[in-house]
Amino acid sequence: MIITTRRINIDTNASADEAYVSVINITPKVHQQAAEEYITNGIVTLFLPGTTAALATIEYEEGLISDFKKIWSRLVPRDIAYKHKFLWEENNAYSHVRASLMGPSLVIPMANKRLILGQYQGVVLIEFDNRARSRQVILQFMGE
């Protein structure tokens, strides 16, 4: 068994829409990293350090992305009182809550140096914060 670690750097923007949600398709970058790997078959674990962004799989289609963004305004509104704002004088508590609900990691199987994803399934980084960030996605490949 071989284990290797790679990184993808992504600069995000704070979303200008009312939901403060940016969905960034990182599927091509993950595929590129897998193609360059020593491992042919196995799994890749993706991990996003940080507390205001998340990783997920979704069909990266304009209508669905719009629906996905809007649901967050209803599930975790940004304009209610959060204690985090008073403790740290920041106004991004909603981004921490949203990111914790989505989660910071994914595990995806690989075969023949390709991610095994559904026909329309893509890997996305979701930025919930209200300011631009430099994000790093850590990819750990395990296999043979």
Image: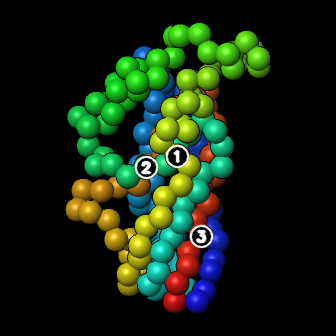
Residue at 33 percent across and 49 percent down: it is 58
Residue to which mark 3 is pinned: 140
Q: Is residue 139 left or right of residue 69?
A: right
Query: Where is residue 104 shown, x and y percent of the image?
Result: 56, 49
Question: How many neighbours does mark 2 have within 10 angstroms: few (below 14), some (14-19), or many (20 or more)?
Answer: some
Distance from disc 2 to disc 1, alpha carbons, whole Å, reads 8 Å
Work out whether 15 lies above or below 3. above
Viewer-nearest of discs 3 and 1: 1
Query: Where is residue 6 shown, x and y percent of the image?
Result: 62, 68
Q: Amino acid at mark 2?
A: Ala
Tell me which label, 2 or 3, sits earlier in the chain: 2
Question: How many neighbours does mark 3 have within 10 angstroms: few (below 14), some (14-19), or many (20 or more)?
Answer: some
Work out whether 109 lies above or below 65. below
Quarter that holds the N terminus: bottom right
Q: Amino acid at mark 3?
A: Gln
Residue to which mark 1 is pinned: 103
At mark 2, the secondary structure is strand
Residue at 43 percent across and 67 percent down: it is 108
Mark sitting on residue 20? none
Query: Where is residue 45 shown, x and y percent of the image?
Result: 53, 66
Viewer-nearest of discs 2 and 1: 1
